[in-house]
Amino acid sequence: EEFCEIFRAKEKTTGKLYTCKKFLKRDGRKVRKAAKNEIIILKMVKHPNILQLVDVYITRKEYFIFLELATGREVFDWILDQGYYSERDTSNVIRQVLEAVAYLHSLKIVHRNLKVGGRGWEHLWVLMCPLPWRSRPLYWQLENLVYYNRLKNSKIVISDFHLAKLENGLIKEPCGTPEYLAPEVVGRQRYGRPVDCWAIGVIMYILLSGNPPFYEEADEDDYENHDKNLFRKILAGDYEFDPPYWDDISQAGE
């Protein structure tokens, strides 16, 4: 679900570039709530692996959120460019994500939508292995883990906090991206910060193997049945380290 438009903005006096997220108030209560929520969360956080808030501008019709501009690629695009993703690359990304999420959790903030992937996943497995990629590319949503700049040793930053929530007691509202949902969210139980750890596990599985751990074929027009079948697999813990995807992954990686 789209909540906002995202632009590259230039400050007139300095020429410095920023990311600008525009939320239209007329788009409804959910959008207004998402904008207010993201502003509250971003004002609370300051961490090297989290995209930082620069300014907020609110008009009668709109919310504008200005953030640092990350000029690097999304992790997914970086994989496509390089043609591979090593265990060392994966370890480096996961370490940074864990440090940022540990910081968020220390503030009782649950991100609730950590993910990688975007259009073009069908090309990823072609690069990583000669077997065909099991694709449903239009269903994958843009990720929120990005490289801060284009330097080889660039850090990873987490963006997109409109679904993040302060954990004042366990949370009831289910939300997130289906392939990354923890069993307690799928089962509509109360949940908390551990759901982010589950999502990080899914991300690590994808980065190491090129495949999501929980997968279900679907027609583009039949996502409801797809999600039901996918959720059954998540609840049952139905995943494998299947060949050939995991043949070259170390025991420590598994």
Image (tube, grey):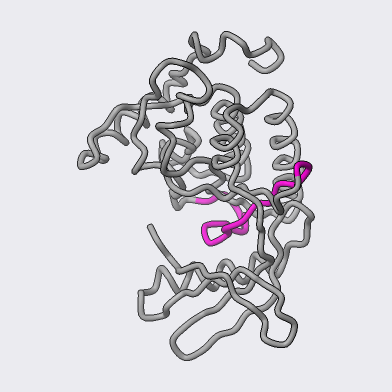
**Farthest residue, direction left:** 221
- Name the image quarter holding residue 177: top left
Q: Give how far across and how far down residue 35 sits, in percent.
A: 52, 71
Looking at the image, residue 157 sits to the left or right of residue 210; the answer is right
Question: Is 168 situated above or below 118?
Answer: below
Question: Is 159 situated above or below 152?
Answer: below
Q: Give how far across and how far down residue 8 sits, in percent.
A: 57, 70
Q: Nearer the viewer, residue 102 or 210?
A: 210
- Say which residue appears at 47% left-offset and 38% top-offset: 181
**32 within the magenta span:** no
Question: Is 251 situated above or below 188?
Answer: above
Question: Is 74 situated above or below 55?
Answer: above
- Name the image quarter holding residue 248: top right
- Say which residue appears at 42% left-offset and 15% top-offset: 131
**168 within the magenta span:** yes
Q: Main secondary structure of the magenta part?
A: loop
Q: Give how far across and how far down residue 27 sits, in percent.
A: 36, 75
- Say which residue appears at 57% left-offset and 50% top-offset: 144
Q: Give how far across and how far down residue 115 sits, in percent.
A: 54, 42
Looking at the image, residue 106 sits to the left or right of residue 123; the answer is right
- Name the image quarter holding residue 187: top left
Q: Nearer the viewer, residue 89 or 183?
A: 89
Number of numbered markers: 0
Q: Which quarter of the rendering shows the N terminus?
A: bottom left
Q: Which quarter of the rendering shows the C terminus?
A: top right
- Range of residues picked out in magenta: 152-171
- Say which residue appears at 70% left-offset and 37% top-offset: 93
**Farthest residue, direction bottom:** 60
